[in-house]
Amino acid sequence: MSRLVVVGVQWGDEGKGKMTDYLAQNSDVVVRYQGGNNAGHTITFKGQKYALQSIPSGIFNPTIKNVMANGMVINPKAVLEELRRLNDMGITDYRLFISDRASVVMPYHLALDGAYEGIKGSNMIGTTKKGIGPAYADKYNRIGIRIGDLLDRDYFALRLREALTVKNMELRMLGLDTFDFEPLFEEFIGYGQSLSSYICDTSVLLNDEVKNDSKILFEGAQGVMLCVEHGTYPFVTSSSPASVGVPIGTGIPPKYIDRALGICKAYNTRVGAGAFPTELDGDLADYIRNRGREFGTVTGRPRRVGFLDTVALRYACHISGIDSLAIMLFDVLSGVGELKICTHYELDGKRIDFVPSTVNAYSRCKPIYTDMPVWTEDISSCRTFDELPANAKAYLKKIEELTATPIDYVSVGPDRVQTIAVK
Ligand code: IMP
């Protein structure tokens, strides 16, 4: 299969970075198609930990083309800092391409992200405050700045003046500091110059790669349940991490997408607000949170944790046409005192098998569980399915049965080698 989409099928943080890095070894191109530096992809490589935010996970391999495609919202200052961090860690030989059509995250987007959250008070979304929502809003309101604009002084001046007219009005209304044209203009022209060697029409590049039958890996950020179209709206991000986001976010027609791999934790987590039917608290939650190091890569926030929810998982697989699953952080469940899988919800006294469209209804859903036998063995050095304890195998088989989707990979630790290829 030449063109594979790697999609998070929960609420993000499923371990996509590790799987993309693992699969990138057999890829010619790795592409980010949505989101921005709200993502945090942690990769452990040669014992060293790297937290990538905007840059695709193929960056460690000098032969792979890494593409930040048009569907992304890019904070150029943050990208330059990320490149500097990679440089400091000795990663200097890489191939990076940034779409001239990708949207730019401007400082006023960061200010507005924080302000909107403040206004929402107890209904706040719990965003990463990276300006993602306001940047996408401007894109669709047609007052966004695009990466290619930064390379043309006259055109960028026009675009920025137009944007600032609106944005400064908005900032003033919210009692926030406004932005002066001149320093902002020069700052972003500078970023454009620093990034100019990477900027191109990535849709042309990618369609050429398709023609050459290159192996392309599309790296989703966040997860399907955070999709602005299909997720638990409004507690979602502002883009479409589902595989349906690939064509629009890259300029590659849908007919060229061959396969979708769903990345799924062996349990569930969620950062930020919003309903979470299988959420746990107390010692059980602490056990999973601590063993899984469930603290946000971008914000450091402790993640909410819960039992695996296969109602949401079935829905996410369905939305994204998932062909097979990778079960991540499976080693975390060793020694857990109690283990359950959610098979259905109960909503207002009725057993249901779908994700309701409103958060109101979703927050009334109670999980219906099937109990699973636990295991105590450390499985982090297992390298084949057969080496796993019987109860661990039964857990995986149950996921396959409940999702009607085969499991291709099982991750039993952060390192690339701690991956079981099931087939
Ligand atoms: P935003 O993407 O910063 O606007 O945040 C919107 C929602 O998506 C919040 O609940 C965030 O916590 C969540 N979110 C955004 N990016 C990630 C991610 O990479 N992993 C997990 N949650 C995320």
Image: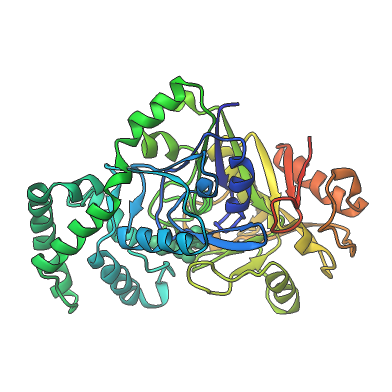
State whether residue 128 is above or below residue 70: below
Q: Return the residue found at the far top.
A: 211
Q: Residue at x 27, y 42 (%)?
A: 101
Q: Quadrant of residue 67?
A: top left
Q: Which residue is at a point 32% across and 73% down the rendered structure image?
A: 114
Instruction: Give the color scheme: rainbow, by chain, secondary structure or one colour.
Output: rainbow
Pinpoint residue 401: horizontal percent, then vertical percent: 77, 40
Q: Is 267 situated left or right of 139 in this image?
A: right
Q: Which image quadrant for residue 324? A: top right
Residue in view at x 18 percent, y 56 percent? 189
Q: Tell me which residue sits at (66%, 55%) in the image.
A: 345
**In x, y percent, where is residue 373?**
88, 58
Q: Quadrant of the C terminus?
A: top right
Side of 228 relative to 301 (left or right): left
Closest to the observer, 239 or 233 = 239
For this rendering, which residue is in front, 125 or 242? 242
Which quadrant is the N terminus positioned in? top right
Where does the image place residue 275, in percent across and percent down from the top left? 54, 64
User: Which residue in the rendered view is the most extreme toward the right?
Assistant: 390
Q: Is residue 277 visible?
A: no
Q: Looking at this view, is 63 or 371 the one in front?
A: 63
Q: How many discs mark residues in the rendered view?
A: 0
The answer to whether residue 119 shows anywhere in this view is yes
- Establish if 232 lies above or below 125: above
In-image side of 34 versus 311 (left or right): left
Above or below, 103 against 83 in this view is above
**Residue 37, position in %: x, y?**
41, 59
